[in-house]
C-alpha cells in the first residue's frame, strides 16, 4: 500500500519506553493511514502513532506495540485561507513550518508549544501542548475548528469544519485534542488564526528576597495583573531553589497600547523590582527539559490563586533533601516543574505528596520525563476522578480492541 | 403515562410535576414555534439529587426525557419527544459560588445568562457569551447549544468559558467533567458535552470562567450603500490585523425592522456596519481611527462613534432586537443560522438576493460579519396558502448554499429538530457514524433528547474489547482508580 521504501523494520531508536516495535510504516495520505490502521487491527497488531518523536516518552509505557505509524510524510500546509483567517494542515507538518507559511500573510496560529522546530501538529494536538500565549488566546481547544480522524477500523471521519463558528454535530476536534492518539490518528487539522502582533514588549520583575513572603508576593502580583484591565499575551512565573521568584509579562499590539500598559503595570508592581528580562524568557519552559542527566519534569495545573502556596509546598518538601527544583508556570494555572536528583524513592515520595496537594484543590500533576524506575512504579497521569468510566466507554467505542497506544493514557486507556 | 410512574415522579418533585394538558402547552415548543409536541409530563426539580432520581426512573422505565432551560432555543432542541417527559431546570437557578481571584463562578443550569454578569459586574468582571436572548436564556441552555453571540468573534463561545460540569448521565449516575483548574488529564469531556444539545445527559452544576471588563469599549456605526461595500470594509479591518470585539452587519430590510421596533437611530442605508473595539485606552483610540479610515475608503458616507454608554446600549439594542423586530414588517418569518467563510460574503449575498427574487419572498440579513455567521430572515405571510412551505424551502436552500461555500448549517442555534436532515448534506455517513460513537458511550439507550441532531440514530453495538490488565496492575504494584 505505501511502497517498500516507507515500510521498514524498527530499530533500537524506535523503542517507546521499553517496548521495541517490529515495524515502522510511513503512509503518504490520510487514506493510507486509515488503510494501515485497518490492516493492523485485522492482524491484531498494536499501533503507536508518531510525529517527530519529540515527546514519545510522555504517557505510561505502552503495554505492547508492534507497529509505529509515522505521520512524517503528511507534512503539507493544505490551505491558508488568510482572508478567512483559517488554515488546514496535515498533522505531520512541523509547527515551525506552519508558522512560517502563515507569516507570509501576517498571521499565526496563536500557540507557543515546546520545540516548535521539530514538534509536529499531530504531536502537539495529541499532548495538548501550549505555552505562554494561552493567557490571551486560550489553548488548542480554543483554536482548533476541524479534524480528519482515522479510526482503527479504517474509517476516515471529518468533524468540525473550515469556519470559526460552527455547532453542527459533536465537537470531535476537542475530544481528539489531548487524547494521546488513543482514539484515532488525526491526519489533518483546521485552525483559526490570529494576526501577527504589530509590536511586542516584555518586562520582568523580581518579587522578593524575603524567604517568608517571596511566594506569596509573587502570587499577589500575578493575581493583581489578572484583576486589572491590561491585556497581556504572557504572564509567567519562574521560581526555583534559591533565587526570588520572577514574573514576566508580555504585551502585544500597537506601540502606544504596549507603552500605556507597561506604565500601568509599573504602577501596579511598585512593590517588585524590575529586572532585565533574560534572553529567551518565553521559552523558559522548554529549558526545563535540558540535558540528559536524571531528573523529573512534570506538568502541573492548579487554580491561579494557589500558585504561591504550591511553590511553598515544593520548597518545604525539597529543602530537607537538598533537592534542587525549578518551575515555569503560566498565570492561567498551568506549568512545568523540574526536580533534580537520582534517588527515585525520594522523588516518588515528593511527587505523590505534591500530586495529592494539587488534586485536593482541583489541580493535577502529570509526569512527563523521569527515570525508568519511577515510571515502573507510578502512574504518570494521576487521578482522573469519577469520569474515568465514561472515558473508558469512549475509548471502547472508538477503539474496541485497544489497537492504539494501549495503556499509555489515563486509567489504563 | 401510567399513574404509578407519575406517583413516583410526584414523590420526588412534589408540586413540581405538571400533568394538566392546559399547563403542558407551555412546554410543547421552544423558540422554534412551528414544531410542537405535547409532553406526557413536565418535571421541575430543584436539586441535583432530584434530577438524578427522575433520570433513574426514566432509565428504568425507558422513558425518553428532554432537558429544558428557558425554552428560547431556535432549532427545536427542547422540543418534547413523543411519550416522553420534559425536565425543566428553571428552578435550579442559584449562583452557588463567586471566586474572583480565580475568575470562576459556579452556577446551577437555570441561572439566566445576564445574571452572571450582573452579579460580577460590580467587581469589573463579565461573562463573555452574549446570545441575543441573554436577558432570558439560561446557562444550561447555553451549555447545551454552545451559544455564541456578537462578541464571540474575540472572546469565544460558551465552550471557551465552561471549565467543569456536574452531569447526570442518562443511566442516572453523577459524573464530574473537567476541573476548576485547566488541562485536567484525560479526554476533554467538557469539550464534547458543551454543544451536545442535551443528548449526552443533564448538566446540574457548571463552573464558568469570567473575564475582566476591558478598560475601554468603543462602538462605531458606518453606513454604506450596499452590503458589498460593507463587506469589503470588514475584509479591510481584518486584513489590517485587528481583532474587534464584534463586527455586525445589517441590510436595509433588517435596519427598517429594527428602527420600527426600537428606534435605534440607525441611518437608512443599504448596508450598516457596527464595529466594536475594546481593550486598553491608547490601543482602542488608535485602532478606531483606523477602522473609520477603512470604512470611508470603502464608501461609507456616515460614520458615528457612540459617545456614551447609553448611546452604545441603544446601538446594541437595535441589533439584538432585530429578529423580533421582523414582526413589524412581516406577519411571519423564519430565522436561519448559517455560516460561510467570511470572504464568500458578497457571492453568498448575491445568490440569496437572486433566490429571494425567484421565490418572490423577502429576505432580511443580519450578520455576525467577523466570523461569517449569517442570519437570513425569510419573511412570509402564513395566511397565504403555500407561502410557509415556500419560505421553509427557501431558508433550507440558503443553508445548502452555506454548505456549498464550505460553511456550516449552524453557527450558534444548534441542529436540534429543525436541521437534523441537513446534517447529511454537511457531513458524510462515516462522519456522522463516528460522532454517534460518542452518543453510544454516554447514552447507549438513547433516552436523553433522542432523535435530535442526527438524521437517524445508530444502534450502539457492544464494542468493548477484551480487558487487558496493565502489567503493573497484574503485579500488584499499582491500581487504576
Image (tube, coloured by chain):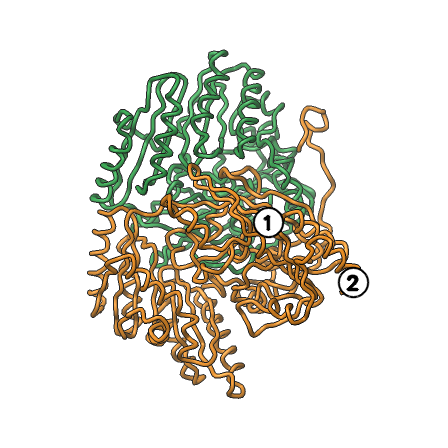
Tell me the shade of chain A.
Answer: green
Q: Quick check: marks 1 and 2 in contact, CB under 8 Å?
A: no
- Name the residue at 38% across, 34% down: A223
- Name the residue at 62% across, 53% down: B200
- Residue on which the image places disc 1: B204
Kindly identify which chain the residue marked by label 2 belongs to: B
Residue A272, x across and y down, in percent: 29, 26
Residue A63's quadrant in the figure?
top right
Is B222 or B405 nearer to us in this picture?
A: B222
- Name the residue at 62% across, 33% down: A62
Query: In terms of secondary structure, where does tag 2 sit?
Result: helix
Residue A250's quadrant in the figure?
top left
Q: Relative to residue A63, is residue B43 depicted above or below? A: below
Instruction: Measure how far apart labels 1 and 2 are at the Cα level.
Output: 27 Å
Tell me if mark 1 has few (under 14), some (14-19) or many (20+) residues whose alpha carbon lies within 10 angstroms of its own: many
Kindly identify which chain the residue marked by label 1 belongs to: B
- Residue on which the image places disc 2: B3
Tell me the shade of chain B.
Answer: orange
Query: In terms of secondary structure, where does tag 1 sit?
Result: strand
Amino acid at each position: 500500500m505505501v511502497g517498500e521504501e516507507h515500510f521498514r523494520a524498527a530499530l533500537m531508536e524506535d523503542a517507546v519506553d521499553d517496548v521495541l516495535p517490529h515495524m515502522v510504516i510511513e503512509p503518504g495520505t490520510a487514506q493510507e493511514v486509515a488503510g494501515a490502521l485497518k490492516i493492523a487491527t485485522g492482524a491484531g497488531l498494536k499501533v503507536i502513532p508518531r510525529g517527530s518523536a519529540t515527546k514519545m516518552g510522555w504517557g505510561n509505557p505502552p503495554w505492547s506495540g508492534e507497529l509505529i505509524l509515522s505521520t512524517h510524510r503528511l507534512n503539507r500546509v493544505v490551505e491558508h485561507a488568510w482572508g478567512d483567517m483559517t488554515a488546514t494542515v496535515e498533522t505531520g507538518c512541523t509547527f515551525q513550518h506552519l508558522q512560517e507559511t502563515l507569516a507570509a500573510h501576517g498571521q499565526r496560529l496563536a500557540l507557543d508549544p515546546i520545540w516548535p522546530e521539530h514538534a509536529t501538529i499531530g504531536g502537539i494536538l495529541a499532548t495538548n501542548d501550549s505555552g505562554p500565549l494561552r493567557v490571551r488566546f486560550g489553548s488548542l481547544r480554543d483554536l482548533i475548528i476541524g479534524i480528519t480522524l482515522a479510526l482503527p477500523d479504517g474509517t476516515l471521519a471529518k468533524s468540525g469544519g473550515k469556519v470559526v463558528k460552527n455547532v453542527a454535530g459533536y465537537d470531535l476536534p476537542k475530544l481528539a485534542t489531548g487524547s494521546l492518539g488513543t482514539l484515532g490518528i488525526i491526519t489533518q487539522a483546521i485552525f483559526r488564526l490570529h494576526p501577527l502582533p504589530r509590536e511586542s514588549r516584555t518586562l520582568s520583575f523580581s518579587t522578593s528576597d524575603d524567604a517568608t513572603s517571596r511566594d506569596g508576593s509573587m502570587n499577589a502580583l500575578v493575581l493583581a495583573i489578572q484583576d486589572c484591565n491590561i491585556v497581556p499575551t504572557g504572564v509567567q512565573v519562574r521560581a526555583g531553589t534559591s533565587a526570588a521568584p520572577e514574573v514576566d509579562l508580555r504585551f502585544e499590539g500597537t506601540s502606544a497600547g504596549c507603552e500605556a500598559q507597561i506604565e500601568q503595570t509599573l504602577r501596579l508592581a511598585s512593590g517588585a523590582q524590575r529586572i532585565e528580562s533574560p534572553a529567551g524568557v518565553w521559552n523558559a519552559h522548554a529549558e526545563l527539559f535540558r540535558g540528559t542527566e536524571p531528573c523529573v519534569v512534570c506538568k502541573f495545573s492548579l487554580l491561579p490563586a494557589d500558585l504561591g502556596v504550591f511553590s511553598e509546598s515544593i520548597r518545604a518538601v525539597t529543602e530537607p533533601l537538598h533537592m534542587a527544583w525549578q518551575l515555569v508556570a503560566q498565570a492561567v494555572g498551568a506549568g512545568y516543574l523540574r526536580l533534580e536528583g537520582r534517588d527515585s524513592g525520594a522523588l516518588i515520595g515528593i511527587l505523590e505528596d505534591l500530586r495529592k496537594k494539587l488534586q485536593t484543590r482541583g489541580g493535577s500533576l502529570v509526569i512527563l520525563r523521569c527515570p525508568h524506575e519511577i515510571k515502573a512504579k507510578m502512574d504518570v497521569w494521576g487521578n482522573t476522578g469519577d469520569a474515568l468510566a465514561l472515558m473508558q466507554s469512549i475509548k471502547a467505542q472508538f477503539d474496541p480492541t485497544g489497537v492504539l497506544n494501549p495503556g499509555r493514557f489515563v486509567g489504563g486507556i | 403515562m401510567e399513574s404509578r410512574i407519575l406517583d413516583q415522579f410526584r414523590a420526588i418533585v412534589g408540586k413540581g410535576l405538571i400533568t394538566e394538558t392546559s399547563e403542558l402547552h407551555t412546554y410543547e415548543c421552544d423558540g422554534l414555534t412551528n414544531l410542537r409536541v405535547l409532553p406526557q409530563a413536565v418535571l421541575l426539580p430543584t436539586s441535583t439529587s432530584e434530577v438524578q432520581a427522575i433520570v433513574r426512573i426514566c432509565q428504568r422505565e425507558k422513558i425518553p426525557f428532554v432537558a429544558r432551560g428557558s425554552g428560547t432555543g431556535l432549532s427545536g432542541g427542547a422540543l418534547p419527544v413523543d411519550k416522553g417527559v420534559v425536565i425543566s431546570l428553571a428552578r435550579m437557578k442559584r449562583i452557588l459560588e463567586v471566586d474572583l481571584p480565580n475568575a470562576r463562578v459556579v452556577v446551577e443550569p437555570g441561572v439566566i445568562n445576564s445574571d452572571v454578569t450582573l452579579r460580577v459586574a460590580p467587581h469589573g468582571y463579565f461573562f463573555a457569551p452574549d446570545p441575543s436572548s441573554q436577558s432570558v436564556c439560561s446557562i444550561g441552555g447555553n451549555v447545551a447549544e454552545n451559544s455564541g453571540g456578537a462578541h464571540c468573534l474575540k472572546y469565544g463561545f460558551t465552550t471557551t468559558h465552561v471549565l467543569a460540569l456536574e452531569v447526570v448521565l442518562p443511566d442516572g449516575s453523577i459524573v464530574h467533567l473537567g476541573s476548576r483548574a485547566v488541562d485536567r488529564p484525560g479526554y476533554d469531556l467538557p469539550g464534547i458535552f458543551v454543544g451536545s444539545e442535551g443528548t449526552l445527559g443533564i448538566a446540574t452544576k457548571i463552573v464558568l470562567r469570567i473575564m475582566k471588563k476591558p478598560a475601554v469599549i468603543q462602538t462605531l456605526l458606518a453606513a454604506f450603500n450596499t452590503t458589498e461595500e460593507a463587506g469589503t470594509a470588514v475584509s479591510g479591518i481584518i486584513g489590517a490585523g485587528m481583532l474587534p470585539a464584534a463586527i455586525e452587519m445589517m441590510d436595509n430590510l433588517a435596519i427598517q425592522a429594527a428602527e420600527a421596533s426600537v428606534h435605534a437611530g440607525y441611518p437608512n442605508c443599504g448596508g450598516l456596519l457596527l464595529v466594536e473595539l475594546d481593550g486598553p485606552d491608547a490601543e482602542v483610540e488608535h485602532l478606531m481611527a483606523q477602522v473609520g479610515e477603512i470604512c470611508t475608503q470603502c464608501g461609507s458616507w456616515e460614520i458615528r462613534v457612540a459617545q456614551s454608554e447609553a448611546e452604545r446600549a441603544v446601538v446594541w439594542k437595535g441589533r439584538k432586537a432585530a429578529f423580533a423586530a421582523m414582526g413589524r414588517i412581516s406577519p411571519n418569518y423564519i430565522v436561519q443560522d448559517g455560516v460561510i467563510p467570511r470572504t464568500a460574503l458578497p457571492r453568498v449575498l448575491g445568490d440569496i438576493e437572486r433566490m429571494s427574487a425567484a421565490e418572490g419572498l423577502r429576505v432580511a440579513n443580519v450578520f455576525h460579519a467577523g466570523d461569517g455567521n449569517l442570519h437570513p430572515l425569510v419573511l412570509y405571510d402564513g395566511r397565504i396558502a403555500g407561502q410557509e412551505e415556500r419560505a421553509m424551502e427557501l431558508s433550507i436552500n440558503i443553508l445548502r448554499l452555506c454548505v456549498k461555500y464550505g460553511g456550516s448549517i449552524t453557527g450558534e442555534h444548534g441542529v436540534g429538530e429543525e436541521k437534523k436532515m441537513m446534517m447529511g448534506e454537511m457531513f458524510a455517513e462515516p462522519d456522522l457514524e463516528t460522532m454517534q460513537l460518542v452518543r453510544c458511550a454516554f447514552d447507549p439507550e438513547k433516552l436523553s433528547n433522542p432523535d435530535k441532531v442526527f438524521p437517524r440514530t445508530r444502534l450502539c453495538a457492544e464494542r468493548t474489547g477484551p480487558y487487558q490488565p496493565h502489567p503493573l496492575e497484574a503485579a500488584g504494584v499499582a491500581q487504576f482508580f
